[in-house]
Image (cartoon, rainbow, N blue to C red):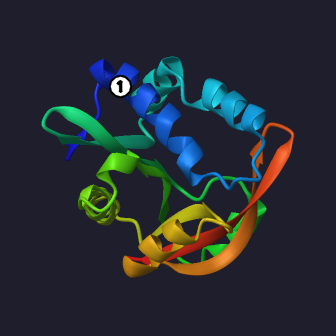
Amino acid sequence: MAEAVGADVGELAELAAVTFPLACPPTSPPDAIAAFIAANLSPERFADYLADPSRTVLAARIGGRMVGYAMLIDGAGTDPDVAKALTLRPAIELSKLYVLADSHGSGVAAALMNAAVTHASRAGARCLWLGVNQKNRRAQRFYGKHGFAVAGTKTFPMGPHLEHDFVMTLQL
């Protein structure tokens, strides 16, 4: 596990474009997914993310190939629903944790999660939080296995389409 660097932006964007749709429920409009990817997961956006001192992007590789990534963002953000759900501060958001489908079950996601928890703990956070689609039971089980619990709900805008997420938290 390593922190991503500028040379990784193209590979991160390719990985994100393949993995983000895996977390979306089948009811998510394909055009909304594509628009979200174009607006938020492009090489240019990843360059911005890597330059942002409040963000940390971790990359997982197997045999030199990037197979997963996680993004952490300092703080609780500005969503009032998230603010209600978070009872411990300081907090860090686990904004993204995605792994290629052919690497599911390989331990990559668990390694990314462990690295994210370690990073948050070392940064002095008392809480790690995330949003997960209410229909994504597989991800919810994974987060539950790692000690996260549902603390509230929020919406996730994907263009004009709204998804409904659980806010899950882990006390550090």
Is 94 positioned to the left or the right of 60 in the image? right
Disc 1 secondary structure class: helix
* Relative vertical location of residue 32 with respect to residue 124 in this rendering, above or below: above
Residue 73 in percent (x, y) is at 48, 49
Of residues 172 and 35, which is closer to you in this image?
35
Residue drawn at x 58%, y 43% as measured from the top left: 21
Residue 162 in percent (x, y) is at 82, 51
Residue drawn at x 76%, y 55% as measured from the top left: 163
* Relative vertical location of residue 154 with respect to residue 160 in this rendering, above or below: below
Number of marks in the rendered image: 1
Is 38 positioned to the left or the right of 15 in the image? right
Is 162 positioned to the left or the right of 137 in the image? right
Residue drawn at x 61%, y 73% as measured from the top left: 86
Residue drawn at x 70%, y 53% as measured from the top left: 26
Of residues 122 and 69, which is closer to you in this image?
69
The C terminus, quarter of image:
bottom left
Residue indicated by mark 1: 11
* Relative vertical location of residue 8 with respect to residue 60 in this rendering, above or below: above
Residue 109 in view of the camera = yes
Residue 80 in percent (x, y) is at 76, 63
* Relative vertical location of residue 16 with respect to residue 74 in this rendering, above or below: above
Residue 58 in view of the camera = no
Residue type pointed to by label 1: Glu
